[in-house]
Image (cartoon, grey):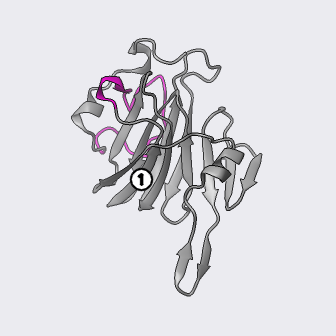
Amino acid sequence: MSDAARQSGNFTATRFPIPGPVLVTPKRFGDHRGFFLETYSARDFAVLGIPDVFVQDNHSLSAQPGTIRGLHFQLPPHPQAKLVRVLRGAILDIAVDIRRSSPSYGRHVAAELTAENAQQLYVPVGFAHGFCTLVPDTEVAYKVTDLYAPECDRGIAWNDPDLALPWPFDAASVHLSDKDRRAPRLRDLPQGFD
């Protein structure tokens, strides 16, 4: 990750070498009762360079470690940016640049998000997103900038050899949906984002 971090309010944003995704770290306030933290502030996120308007919140539970959800994205006219965080457990979160005209096309960023570190990954439009659970009973919540549109819903194979993603489990150990098991490689997708 880049050393250039920006702060606004109770948030620090750290950039990756690939432009677009941002790792957001909220400030945690703790005392004898526990802790409090803000998870989102439109004003502070705009200062950090994330001006998106989020319109839907999603929440998943994955019972088994090694559960992979993704790599998912939506095509225009309903593309989605995402803001992902872990409520319980831990994940390896990955975003792959699928903007064909981008110098970083096909490259990825990855971050370990946990309930303890409270970090969030901002995944902009033009990136496919997926995660792998690292511990049992992991709960993930994420905001999106457009509603789910089944006609625009697409995926890329989690184990696309051209992407060489750093998943912490081998193919024999992962848990996948049928949809994710059948997803095509990036090079086999029709044109999507320019």
User: Residue 91: where, in percent of width, then height?
Assistant: 44, 52
Callout count: 1
23 or 164, which lies in front?
Answer: 23
* Residue, far bottom: 32
- Residue at horizontal 44%, vertical 15%? 187
Tell me which corner region of the image, top left, top right, bottom left or bottom right, holds residue 18. Answer: top right
Q: Which residue is mark 1?
A: 141
Q: Secondary structure at mark 1?
A: strand
Question: How busy is the neighbourhood of tag 1: few (under 14 within 10 Å), some, or many (20 plus)?
Answer: some
Q: Main secondary structure of the magenta part?
A: loop
82 or 110, which lies in front?
Answer: 82
Please provide the residue range marked out in magenta: 149-173
Q: Is residue 188 magenta?
A: no
- Label 1 amino acid? Ala
- Residue at horizontal 68%, vertical 50%? 13
Q: Does residue 167 appear left or right of residue 104 in this picture?
A: left
User: Residue 123: where, in percent of width, then height?
Assistant: 53, 38
Q: Quadrant where the N terminus lies? A: top right
- Residue at horizontal 64%, vertical 65%? 27
Q: Quadrant where the C terminus lies? A: top right
153 or 185, which lies in front?
Answer: 153
Q: Is residue 154 magenta?
A: yes
User: Residue 77: where, in percent of width, then height?
Assistant: 43, 22
User: Residue 158: where, in percent of width, then height?
Assistant: 38, 33
- Residue at horizontal 52%, vertical 85%? 33
Q: Is residue 103 above or below residue 36?
A: above
Q: Is residue 65 above or below residue 28?
A: above
